[in-house]
Image (tube, rainbow, N blue to C red):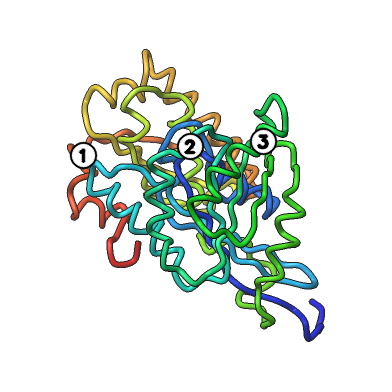
């Protein structure tokens, strides 16, 4: 690590509606998958730090749950997490997508940011979906009328378009300072958390309707195999809310749970850098998303969330 006196370090919050690409952006910038992604709303449930360190800087990105209308107590905790994460940071990246009219969710977020003294960048992701790049001007005009942004950045994470420009401009708002985390750490989450998230991601991928939002994953045991040191033995439980959901997750003759297991094993093996033995169980906890005790037990603790 350089001893350059101009080394900069600081915090950058990512906030936006569900499915605008915050977690995909985080994984892209960090260069490793530390946050799960899917096309389902509410994929991200926790605040996740992604830490980018090089010779000139350490940027700590805070990925947050997508803001949506709360229905369950879990939703309330997720929304509180998103808004709280924009306090005490150096820059806020408000992420949206190309639109012809401002969506209600974006209005709620910007109203919440109205009194902040922190610089807020308008980041419009997924410009690769536009037929003509000039079409982005309509979205820029709409949003600039709503909020005094410090900068406007149309980007495509998928095509790595303008992400470097955004990071370069971002650095101008980051103060000089020392390393805040060891330079070999890329996330604040431990391996058990990430393994649980990788399993949950596969359930999101392979199920439809109400099932994705109704599940949680707990890691019951995760340790090196006593029989083979080249293997990690992992035992996990998929929590759902109804017996009908349990049947969907297991699938006919256990086909779907086998698919979930095999796809999860591939990602876990890549993440841990070791071979994996994975056992999955499915358990019903009725209405767990509305029960504070269940939420606390599953790690969605209000005071720390």
| Label 3 secondary element | helix
Residue at 23% across, 49% down: 73
Quadrant of the snapshot with the N terminus: bottom right
Residue at 70% across, 76% down: 8
> Counting residues from the N terminus, which is met first, the one under dot 3 or under dot 1?
3
Q: Is residue 155 left or right of residue 217?
A: right
Q: Position of residue 147 (x, y in %)?
A: 50, 56
Residue at which label 1 appears: 285
Label 1 vs label 2, nearer the camera: 2
Label 2 vs label 3, nearer the camera: 3
Distance Cα–Cα, label 1 vs label 2: 19 Å
Between residue 139 and residue 171, name the one nearer to us.
139
Distance Cα–Cα, label 2 vs label 3: 25 Å
Residue at which label 3 appears: 127
Quadrant of the snapshot with the C terminus: bottom left
Query: Vertical placement of 232 versus 173: above or below?
Result: above
Residue at which label 2 appears: 201
């Amino acid at each position: 690590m350089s001893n350059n006196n101009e080394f900069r370090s600081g915090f950058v919050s990512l906030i936006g509606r569900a499915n605008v690409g915050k977690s995909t952006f985080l994984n892209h910038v960090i260069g490793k998958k530390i946050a799960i992604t899917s096309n389902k709303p509410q994929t991200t449930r926790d605040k996740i730090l992604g830490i980018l360190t090089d010779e000139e800087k350490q940027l700590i990105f805070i990925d947050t749950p997508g803001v949506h209308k709360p229905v369950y107590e879990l939703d309330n905790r997720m929304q509180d997490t998103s808004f709280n994460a924009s306090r005490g940071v150096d820059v806020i990246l408000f992420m949206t997508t190309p639109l012809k009219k401002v969506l209600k969710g974006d209005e709620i977020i910007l109203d919440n940011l109205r009194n902040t003294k922190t610089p807020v960048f308008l980041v419009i992701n997924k410009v690769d979906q536009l037929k003509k790049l000039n079409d982005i001007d309509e979205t820029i005009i709409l949003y600039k009328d709503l909020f005094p942004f410090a900068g406007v950045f149309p980007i495509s994470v998928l095509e790595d378009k303008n992400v470097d420009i955004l990071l370069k401009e971002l650095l101008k708002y980051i103060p000089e300072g020392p390393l805040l985390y060891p330079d070999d750490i890329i996330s604040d989450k431990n391996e058990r958390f990430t393994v649980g998230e990788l399993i949950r991601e596969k359930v999101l991928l392979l199920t439809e309707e109400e099932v994705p939002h109704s599940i949680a994953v707990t890691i019951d045991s995760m340790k090196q195999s006593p029989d083979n040191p080249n293997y990690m033995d992992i035992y996990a439980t998929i929590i759902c809310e109804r017996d009908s959901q349990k049947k969907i997750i297991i699938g006919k003759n256990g086909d779907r749970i086998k698919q979930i297991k095999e796809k999860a094993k591939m990602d876990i093996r890549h993440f841990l850098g070791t071979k994996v033995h994975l056992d999955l169980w499915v358990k019903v906890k009725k209405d767990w998303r509305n029960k504070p005790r269940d939420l606390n037990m599953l790690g969605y603790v209000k005071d720390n969330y």
